[in-house]
Image (tube, rainbow, N blue to C red):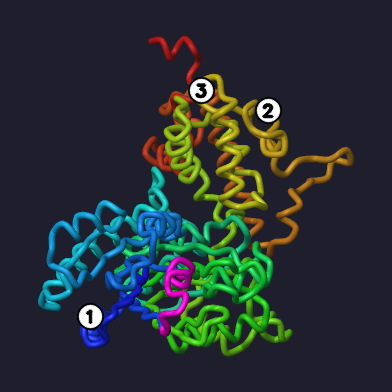
Amino acid sequence: MLIRITLAVHDSVLGKRLQDLLARPDILVQVPRARKNLWERIVSEPSDVLIISQSLLPTPLKEKMGELQLHPDSPAAVVLSESADYKVHARLLAEGCDAVLYAGLAVEQVRDVIETLLEKRRRLTQKRFFAPQPLAEPRLADFVSKSPGMAVFMNVVPRVVGSDTALLIEGETGVGKERLACAIHAEGPRSTGRFVALNCGALPEHLLESELFGHVRGAFTGATAARRGWFEIAHRGTLFLDEVGEIPLHLQVKLLRVLQEHEVQPIGSEKSFGVDVRVIAASNRPLEPEVEAGRFRRDLYHRLSVVTVTVPPLRERGDDIPVLVDRHIRYIAREIGRRVTGVNPLAMQALCRYPWPGNVRELNNVLERAILLCDDTEITLDDLPESVGGTVAGVVGAGPALDSAQRLRLPEQWLAKPLREVREAFVTDLERQYIAGLLTATSGRIGEAAKRAGLQERSLYEKMKEFGLRKEDFRSPHQSKT
């Protein structure tokens, strides 16, 4: 995040030297142009540190310093006093100033004291703007998968982590686009900076512009104080623009300029300032058709999509569901304080068979609900919503089934797939149900189940691992006690 210093110094020579000494990429030094209504302008503008000459202080000082503390940024006040008398300094400190320095000190000494205050300010900003870390911080390892689509996807992602290249993430709602962007940020060189996520489709047009770029006081009706934009707050970090396709065309022009020039101009301001931000954009629908339809600028699309990755929907990566279920249960149970450790075989069949139109987000919500309703250490069919648990009937389950006319009835989602994918899904489903049925019939005895299946025990174990099945789940109560 940019640190803003307001410099109101009576001595123009000293002011210029301080301005030169303090200026750097992560510090924005702003100097009020006129002395008229100086204090009113100071308390209405964003600022982290105020450096002001004693002769420019307003009266009554204690009351005015109270106003400064009510400022949205609560800036630290550094007074440059024309007097070296420590009693004068003590009085200024007692009235609310954070530091008092003799203006006759070497400018380097003044700078060193200010640097100490700036470091404290950075730590305060870190606590104020950075959200607390979740129990499970996103990592790229969360996206490792056996499915071919995810393998292609994960072959690209690690290559862009260490760069500042613009990235466009496409994928259906709920597949984890924001989590992926956060993981890229957390494992990249900007991890010490701010990760800011902004949903561009959730804000009215006039608010979106202010959220992105900030505004000055009086820029529009209701702008009673200036506001920092998220580009400024994300300085030296990452800005994640979710649903970027919802940005209106006239704001797309302004966004393009920021990406090209690396400068932000707040609404109503005549000045712009530099920002160092990596932008990761996301969309729940492909943007190329939007470009062809004239709803999204082609130049902005090319600027955002230097690298484009598409996160496959969960229904295309069914083999990953057992792993995701196990991971989410461990995280959610710990977060809400429940002693749930797993899912029984029938419930796992239901979870693997359900098409998950809401993707990983829906899976997460279903598991959280199930953990709250679960009376034991394992989630059962009864703990799942009917829409999910209803995909399994009996011990073996119901995928393809016979209707009243004795014709094979396929799940509707299969009818939208090519024959090759349906064949693979059918065989996978049949194997899962067959092995679950065998384990049920043999009460989890691996040797007997393997013999019936004509498999080596090791091969059967590999199949069980693939389908998220455990022999313990099929043992009778009597076996469990022995």
Q: Which residue is rendered at x = 56% and y = 62% of the image?
A: 312
Tell me the SS state at disc 3.
Answer: loop
Viewport quadrant of the N terminus: bottom left
Q: Nearer the viewer, residue 383 or 258?
A: 258
Q: Nearer the viewer, mark 2 or mark 1?
A: 1
Q: Nearer the viewer, mark 1 or mark 3?
A: 1
Q: Nearer the viewer, mark 3 or mark 2?
A: 2
Q: Please give the residue where the numbered disc 1 appears in the rendered image.
A: 18
- From the viewer's perspective, tell me whether residue 67 is left or right of residue 124: right
As measured in the structure, the alpha-carbon distance from the residue carrying label 2 to the one carrying label 1 is 78 Å
- Identity, as a three-letter code, of the amino acid under mark 3: Thr
Q: Which residue is rendered at x = 61% and y = 54% of the image?
A: 315
Q: Nearer the viewer, residue 293 or 44?
A: 44
Q: Please give the residue where the numbered disc 3 appears in the rendered image.
A: 442
Q: Label 3 crowding class (10 Å Cα cut-off): few <14, some 14-19, many 20+?
A: some
Q: Please give the residue where the numbered disc 2 appears in the rendered image.
A: 394
As measured in the structure, the alpha-carbon distance from the residue carrying label 3 to the one carrying label 2 is 16 Å
Which region is colored magenta?
A: 33-45
